[in-house]
Image (spheres, coloured by chain):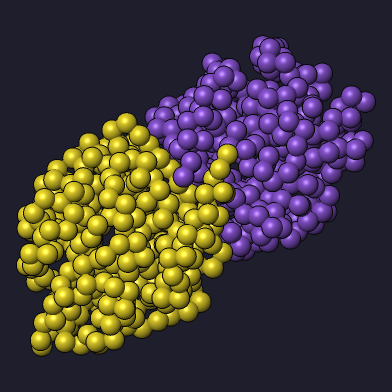
Chain colours: A purple, B yellow
Amino acid sequence: MSLLVVGSVAFDSVHTPTASRERVLGGSAVYCSYAASYFTPVHLVGVVGEDWPAEHTELLRARGIDMSGLRVIPGAETFRWTGKYLPNMNDRETLEVHLNVFAQFDPVLTAPQRECPYVFLANGSPRLQLKTLQQMRQPRLVVADTMDLWIREEHDELMRLFRRLDGVVLNDSEARLLTQDENIVEAGRKVRAMGPKFVVIKKGEHGAMYFSERRTIVLPAYPTPQVVDPTGAGDSFAGGMMGYLAENGRDDPDAIKVAMAYGTLVASFNVEDFSLDRMRRIERRAVDDRMAEYREMLRL
Amino acid sequence: MSLLVVGSVAFDSVHTPTASRERVLGGSAVYCSYAASYFTPVHLVGVVGEDWPAEHTELLRARGIDMSGLRVIPGAETFRWTGKYLPNMNDRETLEVHLNVFAQFDPVLTAPQRECPYVFLANGSPRLQLKTLQQMRQPRLVVADTMDLWIREEHDELMRLFRRLDGVVLNDSEARLLTQDENIVEAGRKVRAMGPKFVVIKKGEHGAMYFSERRTIVLPAYPTPQVVDPTGAGDSFAGGMMGYLAENGRDDPDAIKVAMAYGTLVASFNVEDFSLDRMRRIERRAVDDRMAEYREMLRL
């Protein structure tokens, strides 16, 4: 089944303790769509400025992603983000954000986009996420990401969104901020009580957790020694997870667990190079091989 | 098979954000022995002062732990530690340490103790750990813990010890300190290159990792929502791990993985109350029940 991904499309400038890259392809919808494309047909919805190179669109299209939902605004500039990773490569500092065209992003979905059964509302304001959701016909599974900015500045709108979602995906620090609870298990339960049927908390190098009314699941990250650039790890995790669920037409906890494992593994590839560079060099086969290894590692 | 545990026996004063306990039973050898006692016969070797209450010895003896190796030094005081946990319950500050009798601890093992096939050298100076190891007849598996103090102050002695060990167990922060590497996968590999055949890195609420020449394993912590007091979590982890290996007479990577899972689960009980209070209320059955749940959680 097909997956709709709505979110940011960006130029990222990334500084790590050992290397830097300027203006590389990035954005939540880009990482998420690319990761999901290993599993299922993806429709990307986003916006860019006229500084956007056609090669970037081609790169995504080459993986079968439907790019007809990418609007190009003449006379405007693409969203730009600049960040710097601390030596532990798990924490980062945002140095610059220029929302540019993304600030006024107001997606109008086409008929085929409205019919998508699986929806991922990647990073964007809860207002934007709600407006997108309202256009969907009868989605089977709607999951949204959020971030500290919206938790702080659009809390009420975010709560309105949460009540309409099947699932929420967020970072451990965001879950703590949102619930004011330091214990991540308690925080996960509290986010779930805000409305969504399930909550997935991403812990970076420490893996991910799942909370539904009756189940709690923890999976570790895949132990890759070569973390080059963690940018997009959370979005590629979400993309792998949603892609697997859409591929299999499922949304039950057992399937979400396997989906989280796939998300973990796609993300483990993603962090091994800048931008989409590592994902570009793999096929689905490589993800499945790593899955076999991961499954064996966790077999007790 | 039997397990020898050598390490500190202490009075702990523990402050958490919500509660405190003064002078409760603690120490690395105590937590480790108690946790191991669910699996195998344990011989504890340690030292206390004349302020030591007989009830504490009885409590351990009641779980079948051989306490004949606990020396009581007249006119001296027992090791005391006072610590305070930060709101995240994963980081702590040591407020006071009084080594007292532990500073001069010089264990002389009896013949049955020297014959133990499994040995865990819990927290103590590398000098003390080496002296203990030299007395062992032909141990099958020798594993040691260490801590930041010895990494900083007795580095050469620690390296001498490492070259004689089968395994080392240490915290993530200690692994980073020892290797000066922030990537925990790289740090684990570097510690292994210092001599031991395998290294286990404890990550607290984020689980544990295993590194041998050819394998890397990561297991998540059991997601308990009720973390009351993390004191002794690392030692009870090591105790559960060593206890399971001794019970089954094994030391291969597949067995160590299951052993780490048992260590994880015993530790997950331990943090649910102060001192040994939670472990005192469970039998082996409770650990196995949690194991069935944990195994199912990780089945992909």
Say which of B284 and B261 sits in front.
B284
> In the displayed structure, does residue A290 sit left or right of residue B168?
right
Could you tell me which residue is drawn at 27 percent across and 42 percent down? B198
Which corner quadrant holds the N terminus of chain B?
bottom left
In the figure, residue A179 lies in which quadrant?
A: bottom right
Q: Nearer the viewer, residue B160 or A280?
A: B160
The image shows a total of numbered marks equal to 0
Residue at 17 percent of width and 58 percent of height: B116
- Residue A122 position in % (x across, y down): 72, 37
Q: Where is residue B138 in the image (x, y as percent from the top left)?
A: 11, 50
Give above or below for A86 relative to B8: above
Residue A274 visible here:
no
Q: Kindly identify the residue that appears in the image at 57 percent across and 58 percent down.
A: A184
Q: Position of residue B48 (x, y in %)?
A: 18, 79
- Is residue A266 found left or right of B281 in the rendered image? right
Residue A235 pos. (x, y %): 63, 35
Q: Which residue is drawn at 75% across and 59% down?
A: A194
Q: Using the rendered image of the protein, determine whether residue B211 is visible from the camera's viewpoint.
A: yes
From the viewer's side, name the closer residue of B254 and B107: B254
Quarter of the view holding residue A288: top right
Depicted A5 relative to depicted B168: above or below? above
Q: In this image, A40 relative to A284: left or right?
A: right
Name the quadrant containing residue B197: top left
